Image (cartoon, rainbow, N blue to C red):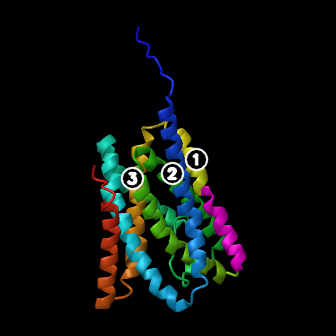
Amino acid sequence: MGLTREFPESSIQRGMRSMVLYLILVFTVLTSIGSVAVAGLFLAFPEKTHRTLIPCLISYASGTLLGTAFLGLIPHALANRPASVCPTVVGGIVLFFFLEKLLLWRHCHGEECEVHAAAGPLIIVGDAFHNLVDGLIISATFLTSVQLGVATSLAIISHEIPQEVGDFAILLHSGYSKSRAMLYNLLSSLASLVGAVMAYFFLKEVQPVTPYLMALAASSFIYIATVDLIPELHRKSSLGAAIRQLTLMLAGIGTVVLFHLEH
């Protein structure tokens, strides 16, 4: 009386868990090591190419970040913890502002950055922390739904590439060789795998934490898009640039919509 029987996990359930873990690992590698590798390729391009491609990536990333936050993460979090999600999002934005002031959550997309130029080692530490959180977010969203996990991973990839390009440029400007800059960025990116594996094995036991983690992820996406990325777009005020930026931003939002995050 009053006891519940635990049934053994079926082969289908084990297969589903294995598939989810596989997807988590694949997309974590793509968002971390893949982003560093793609950013490293940008170093071989001429400066003129950087000035053309980076604003396009930033525009698209702004759309995917905002779309994933408002169409995917927040609605899923509200479905489980409606009363505390909005305060968590607001608190998260304040938290990331504070972390940015401590140089732990800084996203710089150009070589001229007074803060980063004097803090090369701290960039690496900050990126490792950032990647650890990204891994936690990817696992939490895949454990919620595969569609949300894919869309969240896409949003992370889209803003990680221009961030890594900027970090590479700053590390080189601070005296690091190309090989050392690549090595340190790859090492810091491995923190995302640690975060992903931790979340996969422990978030199932502490499932109530997942909505809060998604709310914090949403606040980080909103903060990055509105504070770090969109202001970069305002540096070009021509009509052609504005049309291109708006088109790519809407394309980023549209990409998220394609995953039908509303259900």
Based on the displayed image, in which of its 4 quarters is residue 233 positioned?
Answer: bottom left
Query: Which region is colored magenta?
Result: 177-191
Q: Which mark is residue 26?
A: none
The residue wearing badge 1 is 197
Question: Could you say whether the residue bearing mark 3 is in a helix, strand or loop?
Answer: helix
- Gap in angstroms between the C-alphas marked 2 and 3: 12 Å
Name the one closer to the observer, 117 or 155. Answer: 155
Question: Could you say whether the residue bearing mark 2 is in a helix, strand or loop?
Answer: helix
Q: Residues within 10 Å of mark 2 (few under 14, many from 20)?
A: some
**Label located before the other in sequence (2 or 3):** 2
Residue 175 placed where, x, y %?
70, 81
The residue wearing badge 2 is 23
Q: Main secondary structure of the magenta part?
A: helix
The residue wearing badge 3 is 148
Q: Is residue 215 above or below residue 108?
A: above
Q: Amino acid at mark 2?
A: Leu
The residue located at (35%, 69%) in the rendering is: 252
